[in-house]
Structure formats: C-alpha cells, structure tokens
Amino acid sequence: MQTNLLYINHNYNNTNIIKYPVISDKALALASDNRYSFMVNPSSNKISIKLAIEELFNVKVIKINTCNIPKKKKRIGKYIGWKPNYKKAIVTLADDYVINLFV
C-alpha cells in the first residue's frame, strides 16, 4: 500500500479531481451494470481518481478505466475554434454499492 502513495498527486483535493458525472444514454446504460462515468482532471491518475471516488461517495471501487479525449475542431460559419480536450473515467463499483446521481 505504501508504493501506491507515491503516485498520488497531493496538489489536488477530491473536488478538483472529479469534475462532474457524465449523463448520457451510454452512461446511463452502464449504470445498470454498476459502472459510472465521470469527467476528471486530465493530470489525475487512476489511483487518485479511485481514492477521490471512494471518499466522496463512500463506495468501494473495483476497477477504473480512463481515456484522454483529444481536442476537436469546431467551426461556426467562417470562424474556427477548438473544443478542449478532457479525460473521462469509467468507474466499476462493488456489487453492494450504488451511486445515486439524481438526488
């Protein structure tokens, strides 16, 4: 357990790591399998995400999958801009635990 503590970024607290839950059709379908999607800070790692979820929601996390979504070009008329890149985490919980997103 002490080796895991080396990888935790201590510059962020839990509310800075987890930005907001993803509410989409695919995310709600995953929620029936006890998997929840969250937008997270791009510099956070799986260990810090796991500790933040367990502390914020009082649940037991089994597995975390993360993916970095690249920035995309967005065009409105003659103006070209960019949608920012972000990081998404899909968290699998133990069978006994549930996160109620619609409170």
Image: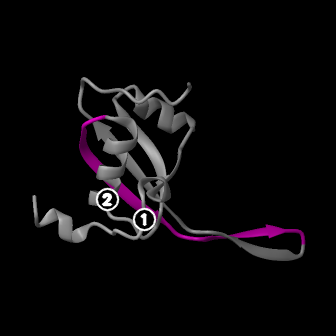
Which is closer to the viewer, label 1 or label 2?
Answer: 1
Three-letter amino acid code at disc 1? Tyr
Residue at 25%, 37% (x, y): give it: 60
Per the image, label 1 sits on a secondary structure element best described as: loop
Residue at 16%, 63% (x, y): give it: 4
* Viewer-nearest residue: 4 or 69: 4
Asked if residue 28 lies left or right of residue 47, the reply is right
Determine which of the numbered discs, if any, sits on residue 12 in the image.
1
Magenta segment: 59-77
Gap between marks 1 and 2, in whole Å? Answer: 9 Å
Residue at 40%, 70% (x, y): give it: 11
Q: Do the residues labelled 1 and 2 touch (CB within 8 Å)?
A: yes
Residue matched to label 2: 48
Task: Please state, as top left, top right, bottom left or bottom right, where the C terminus lies in the image.
Answer: top right
Mark 1 crowd level (few <14, some 14–19, many ≥20, 10 Å Cα): some
- Residue 48: image x %, image y %? 31, 59
Tell me the chief SS of the magenta region. Answer: strand
